[in-house]
Image (cartoon, rainbow, N blue to C red):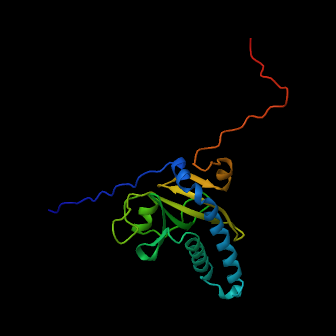
Amino acid sequence: MTAKVENKIEKRKRISKEDAHSVLNEYYVDLFNAYYEAIDRYNTEIRQTIPEARTRLNSVLLNAKLTESFILKFPENWNKGKYGRIVFRWEGIQMLIKKLNENSKPSYIPTLLSDAIINQLQTSLFDDNDAKEEPVLIFGYTKNRDGQLIHPRIVYYAGEVEWVIDQDYIVTHPTYGDNTPIEEIEVRLKGERDIKAK
């Protein structure tokens, strides 16, 4: 008779949208600029190869240009993880760059590591156990039916989409220098008074 040993892998720490927004607020401009600069570089280089010869080149070149652009913008925030995966880190948050489907689910070939990433399991992305509790966010994009890369966004995926921060969210949730939300300013016409109910 053999005993069945069950290894239970703990989940990573959860992160709220508000907490992630607070940590990443000062980096948003560079995050999205890195994405758009990478797309420009990709388009410049891919045009140098005729379409018939681009077999498997598109995704490899796009991934290389995205990684390069993010490394250039954040030279102090990246590490090479297991299997050559580039991982960016900010104050207790890890971030990967990944293609997403239209529902913001990361597209992965199923492996133990990719399953751990999309389910927020405490499998280390590095060769040691450093930071295995930190939540993993995905900076992703979607390829539409016409082959255009659209909707760059930051996704927290834990078995399903928990939340998304995109450019619309950033514009509608501005913060001031100390990361406190800017309060709505009430504007009144000159001479206008509050009408109180009697």
Residue in the image at 70% along x and 69% along y:
148
Residue 162 visible in image: no
Where residue 19 sits in the image (x, y, percent)? 51, 49
Most extreme residue toward the top is 198
Residue in the image at 58% along x and 64% along y:
140
Most extreme residue toward the left is 1
Q: Answer with the quarter of the image where residue 39 lies.
A: bottom right
Q: Answer with the quarter of the image where residue 190 lies.
A: top right
Quadrant containing the C terminus is top right
65 shown above or below 50: above
Describe residue 113's horizontal placement relative to residue 104 as left or right: left
Describe residue 167's horizontal placement relative to residue 161 as left or right: right
Total number of numbered discs in the rendering: 0
Residue in the image at 58% along x and 60% along y:
27
Where residue 162 sits in the image (x, y, percent)? 52, 50
Where residue 147 sits in the image (x, y, percent)? 69, 71
Where residue 94 sits in the image (x, y, percent)? 47, 62
Residue 52 visible in image: yes
Quadrant containing the N terminus is bottom left
Describe residue 98's horizontal placement relative to residue 166 as left or right: left
